[in-house]
Amino acid sequence: MPQAKISDSAPIETPEPAPPLLSPLSAGEPIFANTSLAPNPSALLATSATHSPTSLENKPAPPEAVPHNLEAEQALLGALLLNNNVLENVGDFLKPEHFYSPVHGKIFRAIQFLRDKNYSADPITLKDFFQKDDALSEVGGASYLVDLANSVVSLMNTADYGVLIYDLFLRRELMKIAQETTDDCRNSDLEINAETIVEDVEKKLYSLVTLGQEAHSVVAFRDAITQAIESAEMAFQRDSHIVGVTTGFLDVDRWLGGLHKSDLLIIAGRPSMGKTALATNMAFNAAQTSLRNPQDGATVVFFSLEMSAEQLATRILASESGISSDKIRRGSIRKDDFPKFVEVSRTIHDLPLFIDDTPGLSLSTLRNRARRLKRQHNIGLIIIDYLQLVDASSRRNDNRVQEVSTITRALKTLAKELDVPVLALSQLSRAVEQRDDKRPQLSDLRESGSIEQDADVVMFIYREEYYELRKEPKEGTEEHAVWQKKMNGIYNQAELIIAKQRHGPVGIVKLFFDGQLTKFGNAAA
């Protein structure tokens, strides 16, 4: 695709949009108002039309003009008026606001409107749109539309004209962002802190980059089926027989096929069931696997809104060293255990795992940081602990259920946007405690917004041992003997209930759980 060039001398200051008085463009006149912005003429303008709409006033652009190309806009609009089918070449990415000239943007919008109604768009049908439009009147009124159509020499390169118009729009927006950032940084009252400015700039830049991605969202079925076959072949060739990111738990990977790209996965449960421990184990397993087998593992970012990065790191150290986190925190490590502790620390020191423990993290900040990490470190898995702690209160009138719905929809969109699995933890309400069978079920999510609808996979973590431990009868009684027998059968056992899987079966996966080390593992065969 042609790329417009811009000189180092182009100033940052952004003037107001061009007035409707446009420069006439003759055969001997430069394509760009600022000659330092000229694109590669051999690639783009080999068959450029010669335009000379006579109603336009000859008004040379000032030297500080922002990047624009009025002739490209005129050439494209003229081609559209001459042959409406040209819209198919640019309609999926070009918008009225991308035009430098407000008049040209209005003409393009009118053409789109008529074509959407299956009407022909030409100077005659467009005339009614601009009968009371002073801007068009200033450049010649309806006769300007005729001039645009009559000045077309060729319909070739119309797609390239559209790309060029869009590219120059991006450049103008970049200059605006730069100017706004400069103004914010110069704010003498320090009303905005520097970190907020950085996050705001990242958000604007990422939005700018993704503005035209809709053009690439349509996939031919033959391409989609090829991708599906390639994924199946990849899974077949792997020893693990998974396509997604490994969880590190054999039976979980068998049921899910790994954590799949663009999926939103939920692990829900009551407090003390081990949600954070399970998510931490999965994060560690995926990151560690990526060091020896990048296909199965991933670089991971863990947004921990409940625990600090140090606490999570301590849990991982405890899990891998076999020394309880309580002993690590209190410094009660035995002398003969210390070498092992140090060795484990060295082994996992460079793990591709990022932890963001910002409390009360806003939804917009979370997304911006995830995008940045994707760009900088190519993260392959996002984990959020837990979604009810994410601040989504952009509208203060929203209740908590609506906010959670906003969060889950945004996380699903983020998973698709970054093409990574997003694993979010969720608390369950006390309603579970009112039942005799305290195994969670999908209906327990009904008061938690649209989690069930938005998620591709919903899993519940359940440990019967936790509840039975609190029912211990008096020692020495017959009831205690029955209780002890039951406890022996469920000791260190956990269930991961796969209650929803959009593209697979549901069921229960048995796991091992060590409460001292807060570590899950594969259940004994």
Image (tube, helix red, strand yellow):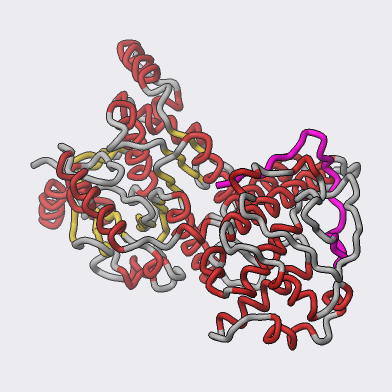
Left or right: 165 with respect to 389? right
Question: Can residue 395 be seen by looking at this rendering?
Answer: no
Main SS, magenta residues: loop
Left or right: 492 with respect to 78? left
Left or right: 322 with respect to 239? right
Residue 251: image location, x then y, percent: 17, 47
* Residue at figure coordinates x 18%, y 41% from the top left: 522
Tally the numbered discs.
Answer: 0
The quadrant holding residue 319 is: top left
Foreground residue among 56 and 184: 56
Q: Is residue 216 magenta?
A: no
Residue 277: image location, x then y, percent: 36, 42
Left or right: 217 with respect to 167? left
* Residue at figure coordinates x 43%, y 56% from the top left: 416
The quadrant holding residue 19 is: bottom right
* Residue at figure coordinates x 91%, y 58% from the top left: 59
Over which residues does the magenta segment extend?
Answer: 1-23
Residue 176: image location, x then y, percent: 78, 50
* Residue at the limit of the structure toward the left, as seen here: 525
Question: Can residue 467 be seen by looking at this rendering?
Answer: yes
Residue 156 higher or lower than 431, as above or below: above
Residue 428: image location, x then y, percent: 40, 62
Foreground residue among 395 and 489: 395
Residue 333 higher or lower than 192, as above or below: above
Q: Quadrant of the C terminus?
A: top left
* Residue at figure coordinates x 49%, y 37% from the top left: 355
